[in-house]
Image (cartoon, grey):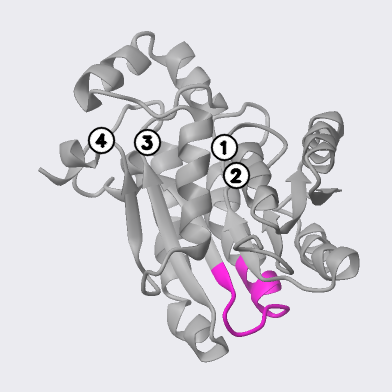
Amino acid sequence: MGLLDSKTAIVTGSSRGIGAATAKILAGEGAAVVVNYRQKAPRANKVVAEIEAAGGRAVAVGADLTNEADVDALAQAAVDSFGSLDVLVLNASGGMESGLGEDYALRLNRDAQVSMLKAAASRMKPGSRVVFVTSHQAHFIDQVETMDAYEPVARSKHAGETALRELIPWLEEKGITFVVVSGDMIEGTITATLLERAAPGAIESRRDAAGKLYSVEEFGAEVAKMVTADVPTGHTEYVGGAEHFTA
């Protein structure tokens, strides 16, 4: 018996990177997984194929989280495909992409997170869990400066976390717990790649400061753990390098 047998999980932004790693782990623990993507259907379908080849259940669902109709359709897809929605991993984020508007970071990292949580929570039963994935640079942005290229993203993600935490009393009334996973820079992610382009040497500098940077697979495993971890609602799990920010 897996920890998540008979459960259904949505992992936003899971066609690659941390989201894909998390989705595969949750499927391995018995969950049926909705693999969400914005544009890259082939990538999402590959993740689904890998999950199914390992004996799991998954479906790829395209949805732009900044679009309200897409958000509602994504939440409903979990119920239509697998009969329930028990876990929501809010992994999708961005803001360093070009051509999506100056306010894109805030629309995705704050507004879309709130919309997705509300759409999912309306379909979740007591005992369900929401996990929000963020970075130390965002979580601690009011205490510790971050790189100029990342600051707009960090501030929008911090605003998203704040807005989500304001919903904890509402979630508690529904019997849904909310947990935050905060990590250092993750090697192999698109964000790290874009930061390195904007500020050459950023990855090496952060690695030297932290002593170690987690890989996508390692961090995905930490995110997956928090889906079933025995922690109180509102808990923040710090993964790697937090000492630099909390000193």
Cα–Cα gap, marks 2 and 3 = 26 Å
State which quadrant residue 21 falls in.
top right
Q: Which label's residue is closer to the chain start, 2 or 4? A: 2
Cα–Cα gap, marks 3 and 4 = 18 Å
Q: Which amino acid type is marked by label 4?
A: Gly
- What residue does disc 3 label? 151
Q: Is residue 96 above or below residue 56?
A: above
Residue extent of the magenta highlight: 117-129
- What residue does disc 1 label? 18
From the viewer's perspective, is the residue at label 1 or at label 2 nearer?
2
Q: Is residue 40 visible?
A: yes
Residue occupying the point 47% across, 23% down:
192
Q: Which label's residue is closer to the chain start, 3 or 1? A: 1
The residue positioned farthest toward the front in the image shown: 1
Q: Categorize mark 3 by other alpha carbons within 10 Å: few (<14), some (14-19), many (20+).
A: some
Cα–Cα gap, marks 4 and 1 = 17 Å
Q: Which amino acid type is marked by label 2?
A: Thr
Q: Categorize mark 2 by other alpha carbons within 10 Å: few (<14), some (14-19), many (20+).
A: many
Q: Is residue 17 above or below residue 64?
A: above
From the viewer's perspective, is the residue at label 2 or at label 4 nearer?
2
Q: Which label's residue is closer to the chain start, 3 or 4? A: 3
